[in-house]
Amino acid sequence: MDFFNKLNFNTKILMIVGLSSIICAATSTIASLYFASNDLILGIEEKAQTVHSRLEAATEFVALQGGLEPIVERLKTKYKSDAEMSDADKLDVLKQVPIFAAMKIGAKDAELEGYKFRVFSDEPRKAENLATAFELTILKKFEANKDLKQFIHEDGTNVTVFRPVRLSKAQGCITCHGHPDTSPWGNGKDILGYKMENWQDGKLHGVFAIETSIDKISTLRHVGENRMKIIFFGSIPIVVSLILSFFLIKSPINSLKAVANNLASVTGNVANTSQKMSNNSTGLSQATIEQTASLQETAASLEEVGAMIKKTSDNAVSTSEASAKSREKAEKGNAIVSKMIDSMEEINNSNNNIRLEMDRSNQEFTEIVKLIHEIGNKTKVINDIVFQTKLLSFNASVEAARAGEHGKGFAVVAEEVGNLASMSGGAATEISQMLSESIKTVEKIVSQTKVNVDRLMIEGKEKVDYGSDVARDCGVILSEIVDNIKVASDMAVEISNASAEQSQGIAEISKAMGQLDVVTQDNSQTSQELSQVADVLSHDATKLEESVNELLKTINGIKA
């Protein structure tokens, strides 16, 4: 479409006429070529059908002669089997077979007449006649539809006409393909020695195919030359139409072009004048707008500065109040730190008291150990008594033995006393062992407790001392903070007073800027109205120029 728009009006008209002529000529040429091609295909099909008809006529003619049965009877009486028959006899038989005659006629001069003849079957007597995969599909078509008399196949290169070959009892086909019991030799074979298949009348035995090359027939009929002639004569109207159109439209186009050029010149002058007026108005309006914008920005900046000064003043007041509160809090914090230092001293004193109390407890544990030692000494005395008792019991036993029968009772008493002494000795020994272990355990507990308490007291004292130092440092820092806050509070009051004075000055400047902005806006409105009038005139001139340019583009075409 862009290419077409770039062409001038003269060329567009010539192109339209030319394209119309080309389309008409091409349509007629294509139609002529199409019908010529169809006529060629129909001619090929008709020729093939003629050959088929000739073969069918030959088949009927040979069958009507009725020569097959007489020759079979003659040879059957002359020979005992087909093996004795000569080739000449076999050829005589074949000449009387209708289908054989058709095959011979179909193959005769086939190359010369421009076609190929083939007969095929799915059960041929000769291997060369076995159907291919494609030919089997043709056979199935005829088997499926007994009323189908012909099938035409065209693949763009060849045209093939197929006709079925069915057995006919009237034509003598059953003589060779009938029941084996009817064999002339009595061995199930026909006169030529082929096995009889027991086929019935009307069975599809094979297919005759007449194949013709489209290119070969086209060459013979000079189809290519005829096509070139059709194209040539179809092109002549196109050239004539273009020449006539060129001379007929040349004069009107030139007149229209001159008018358009004059109109374009006048339109350009009007557009330039309106453009200059618009530019001047736009410049004045733009300058006024920029001045107004500058005044508004200045006023806005002054308002922002005033707001910032007021905010600074408010912040200074807030800072002064916050400083006073911070000073009060810092003083309270200093007092709390002092109390914390006193508490740390009290904690240190409490730790010392705990240490003294633990020393007193350790002393009491030492007294307990001494008491256990005394119990151990008393237990040793018991052991001595037990030893003496055992010795007395032994002496009593000796004396009882000397007394004989009179001393037996005393011996029993002495034995019991000895047993009691042994039991007392064992118990005393166990008590002595328990006291010894208790002494060791108590001494170990006392020693370990003293070590742990001393270590904990030392660590606690160190932490208390460190906390006391930190608290003292905090007190010093808080005192310094209180002094600094007092200085900051005084400075904030001074800033607040200065900000109030600045805010009053800014308000007066802002009022003057507002009055100046009103005057500038009046000037801007007047300038804008003048600019709008210039824009309307410029817009109308532009539309007129666009219309003229569009007309020139149509006449002269778009320049690349």
Image: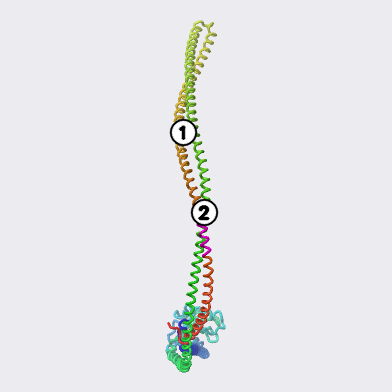
Measured along the vertical axis of the image, is residue 511 above or below residue 371? below
- Please state the horizontal and vertical placement of residue 526, each as a whole percent of the image: 53, 74
Number of marks drawn = 2
Q: Secondary structure at mark 1?
A: helix
Between discs 2 and 1, the one toward the N terminus: 2
- Hey, what amino acid is under mark 1? Gly
Label 1 crowd bin: few (<14), some (14–19), many (20+), radius 10 Å: some
Label 2 sits on residue: 313
- Please state the horizontal and vertical placement of residue 552, each as a whole percent of the image: 47, 86
Identify the magenta region: 496-512
Residue name at image x 53 percent, y 76 percent: 529
Q: Nearer the viewer, mark 2 or mark 1?
A: 2
- Please state the horizontal and vertical placement of residue 275, each as a whole percent of the image: 48, 80
Q: Does the magenta segment cover residue 503? A: yes
Label 1 sits on residue: 460
Residue 440 visible to an observer of this rendering: yes
**Which quadrant of the structure image shows residue 227?**
bottom left
Contact? badges 2 and 1 (CB < 8 Å): no
Viewer-proximal residue, 44 or 349? 349
Q: Does the magenta segment cover residue 543? A: no
Viewer-proximal residue, 29 or 468? 468
Label 2 crowd bin: few (<14), some (14–19), many (20+), radius 10 Å: many
- Please state the horizontal and vertical placement of residue 123, each as a whole percent of the image: 49, 78
Viewer-proximal residue, 87 or 483? 483
Residue name at image x 53 percent, y 73 percent: 525
